Image (spheres, rainbow, N blue to C red):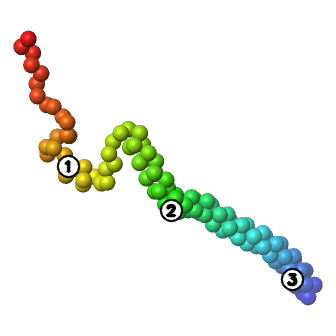
Amino acid sequence: MDEEIKQLLEKNLELTGEIHKMTKTIKNYVVFQRIMSLIYLLIIVIPIIIGFIYLPPILKNLFNQYQSLMGGAPIKSLSELLENSSTAGQPPNADFTAPDLSQ
């Protein structure tokens, strides 16, 4: 009976060692995946933050240059454009009269 228990204990010890190796491998894989997910998140978030910081001044300058090339006066806001329109509901400089075809 003692010999049988000794064999079972040795087999159990061998299987426990294999399980320990597999668990260690899985733990390393999970740690690696967590690090990679953090890197992926940073790859996505950092450019968005940099864009929010640096793009508005660049786009404002670009828009001002475009307006100066087109010869238009700079518009400060949409509300200013709406307040300065000549007639309500119609764009300024629009002529909606029918042409005279009696000639």
As shown in the figure, which amino acid type bears the numbered disc 1? Asn
Examine the rendered structure and indicate whether residue 70 appears above or below residue 48. Answer: above
Examine the rendered structure and indicate whether residue 58 appears above or below residue 31. Answer: above
Residue visible at 38% across and 43% down? 67
Which residue, given by chain and number where applicable, does mark 3 sit on?
9
Q: Disc 1 or 3, which lies upstream in sequence?
A: 3
Q: Secondary structure at mark 2?
A: helix
As shown in the figure, which amino acid type bears the numbered disc 3? Leu
Which residue, given by chain and number where applicable, does mark 1 sit on?
84
Q: Is 67 in front, or is 53?
A: 67
Per the model, the C-alpha gap separating discs 1 and 2 is: 32 Å
Q: Secondary structure at mark 1?
A: loop
Residue visible at 14% across and 45% down? 88
Residue extending furthest left? 102
In front of the other: label 3 or label 2?
2
Q: Disc 1 or 2, which lies upstream in sequence?
A: 2
Circles 1 and 3, Cβ within 8 Å, touching? The answer is no
Which residue, given by chain and number where applicable, does mark 2 sit on?
53
Q: Secondary structure at mark 3?
A: helix
